[in-house]
Each structure stands twice: as C-alpha cells, then as structure tokens.
Image: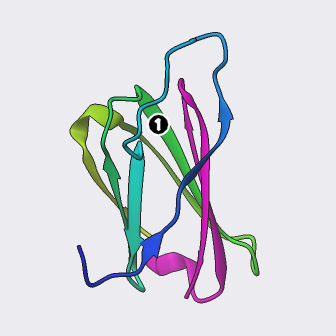
C-alpha cells in the first residue's frame, strides 16, 4: 500500500523474560487511509491485541488477531477525524504508533 501514509510503529516495552534477540527487520509495518489501518506483521508475534483510539474524542476500535496471518485491516471509519494512537500488545512486547486524519 505504497500510496498511503506510513504510521511509524515502535517497540515501547519488550518482554524481557523471553530473552530472544531482536531482528533488524521492523516487526510491524502500518499504513492508513481515511477509513482503514493496514498492518503487516513481518514476524509471528503470537496473538496481537490492537487498540486504535481517537485521542480527541476517546472513541476507539479494538480487535485481536493472530500475527501469522501477516496482513490485517482495521476499519476506523467510525472514529472520525483527529489525532490517533495505536497500541499493539503481543507476547513479545507492546508496540505504539500515532497518526492524524
């Protein structure tokens, strides 16, 4: 989805008990349109809980997906315009990102 704005996703908190070394490949890539967020999981991180919140209104969508399915679409059309936060929780750690519409 090269024509859509990328959402920088960073690892906020890593599961230190796992002890697995991190790779140089970004675990999760994310892009957005006005109605959808597209996530690509480049690594199997187990089950992922995804919460996307409109920081201006508090409205949010939440979903849970297996990361071995690679490509995920999350409908954000009900959230309106504003500043958005995305939190992705996995067994490997917590990933965050932000974008605005």
Where's the C terminus, which quadrant?
Answer: bottom right
Position of residue 94 relative to residue 44, above or below, is below
Counting every numbered tag in the picture gives 1
User: For the point 25% across and 43% down, which residue is it?
Assistant: 70
In the foreground, 46 or 75: 46
Task: Give the side of residue 74 with respect to residue 2, left or right.
Answer: right
Where's the N terminus, which quadrant?
Answer: bottom left
User: For the point 57% across and 78% down, which residue is it?
Assistant: 79
Q: Position of residue 32 (x, y in %)?
A: 40, 75
Q: Is residue 24 magenta?
A: no
- The image quarter containing residue 44 is top left
User: For the point 63% across and 73% down, which residue is it?
Assistant: 84
Q: Residues within 10 Å of mark 1 (few under 14, many from 20)?
A: many
In the foreground, 42 or 74: 42
Look at the numbered disc 1 and give the secondary structure of its residue.
strand
User: For the point 46% across and 37% down, which residue is it?
Assistant: 48
Q: Position of residue 87 (x, y in %)?
A: 61, 51
Query: For mark 1, what is the residue?
Result: 48
Task: Give the side of residue 63 with respect to residue 69, left or right.
Answer: right
Task: Give the side of residue 3 with respect to residue 23, left or right.
Answer: left
Position of residue 89 relative to residue 22, above or below, is below
Q: Position of residue 2 (x, y in %)?
A: 24, 77
Q: Position of residue 63 (x, y in %)?
A: 47, 48
Position of residue 63 relative to residue 90, above or below, is below
Give the residues in magenta.
76-101
């Amino acid at each position: 989805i090269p024509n859509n704005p990328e959402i920088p996703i960073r690892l906020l908190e890593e599961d230190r008990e796992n002890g697995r070394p991190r790779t140089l490949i970004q675990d999760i890539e994310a892009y957005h349109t006005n109605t959808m967020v597209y996530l690509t999981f480049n690594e199997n991180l187990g089950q992922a809980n995804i919460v996307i919140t409109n920081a201006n209104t508090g409205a949010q969508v939440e979903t849970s997906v297996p990361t071995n399915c690679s490509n995920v679409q999350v409908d954000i059309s009900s959230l309106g315009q504003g500043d958005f936060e995305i939190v992705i929780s996995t067994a490997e750690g917590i990933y965050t990102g932000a974008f605005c519409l």
